[in-house]
């Protein structure tokens, strides 16, 4: 839906690479939808016409012995300035103009925390990458006997 609306209107390429199996999850779908929407919107706003956004999932991903489902949203935009990175998930006055509230990433952080997930960001002049690690439900981490 996002690709058909924002992607086409702004001439953005949106690539989607989903894990072949839908992992079991007990996370609120509205939380995940809001996180993805906020991250995609930010990526689209950072890009000029002809830019590229990639959405990918991997499952399972192991971190310190815990099992997660990974969701990555990355773009090939100009990257985030250091002063933005230092306050990344804090509510701030938007630098994007009066139509923006500067709350998107603070909402992403709150929803991530509510789900017990981890969110990471790395940014450079070659683009920005957000990585969300969603804890797998206990049923999905059980090993066969």
Image: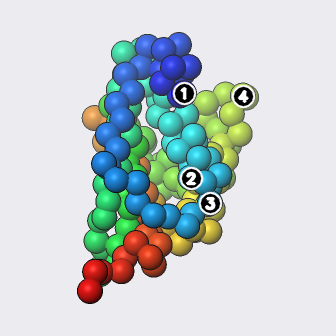
Tell me whether circle 3 and circle 2 mark residues in contact (CB < 8 Å).
yes
> In this picture, is 56 found above or below 115?
above
Tell me whether circle 1 and circle 3 mark residues in contact (CB < 8 Å).
no
Residue farthest toward the bottom in the current orientation of the protein: 145
- The residue under label 2 is 32
Point out the tag, 4 or 3, that comes first from the N-terminus.
3
**What's the CA distance linking mark 1 and mark 2?**
15 Å
Q: Residue at x 40, y 60 (%)?
A: 23
- The residue under label 1 is 1
Question: x, y percentage for residue 20?
Answer: 30, 48
Q: Which mark is residue 28?
A: 3
Question: x, y percentage for residue 60?
Answer: 31, 64
Tell me whether circle 1 and circle 4 mark residues in contact (CB < 8 Å).
no
Q: Which mark is residue 99?
A: 4
Total label count?
Answer: 4
Q: Element at badge 3?
A: loop
> In this picture, is 52 found above or below 64?
above
Q: Element at badge 2?
A: helix
Is residue 74 or residue 124 the one in the foreground?
74
Q: Residue at x 65, y 52 (%)?
A: 30
Point out the tag, 1 or 4, that comes first from the N-terminus.
1
Q: Choose mark 1 or mark 4, whichever is in front.
A: 1
Point out the tag, 1 or 2, that comes first from the N-terminus.
1
């Amino acid at each position: 839906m996002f690709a058909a609306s924002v992607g086409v209107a702004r001439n953005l390429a949106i690539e989607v690479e989903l894990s072949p199996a839908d992992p079991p999850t007990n996370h609120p779908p509205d939380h995940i939808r809001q996180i993805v929407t906020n991250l995609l919107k930010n990526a689209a706003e950072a890009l000029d016409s002809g830019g590229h956004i990639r959405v990918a999932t991997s499952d399972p991903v192991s971190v310190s012995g815990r099992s997660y489902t990974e969701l990555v949203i990355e773009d090939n935009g100009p990257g985030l300035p250091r002063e933005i990175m230092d306050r990344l998930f804090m509510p701030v006055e938007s630098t994007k103009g009066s139509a923006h509230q500067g709350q998107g990433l603070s909402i992403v952080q709150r929803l991530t925390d509510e789900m017990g997930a981890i969110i990471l960001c790395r940014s450079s002049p070659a683009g920005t990458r957000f990585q969300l690690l969603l804890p797998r439900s206990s049923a999905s981490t059980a090993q066969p006997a």
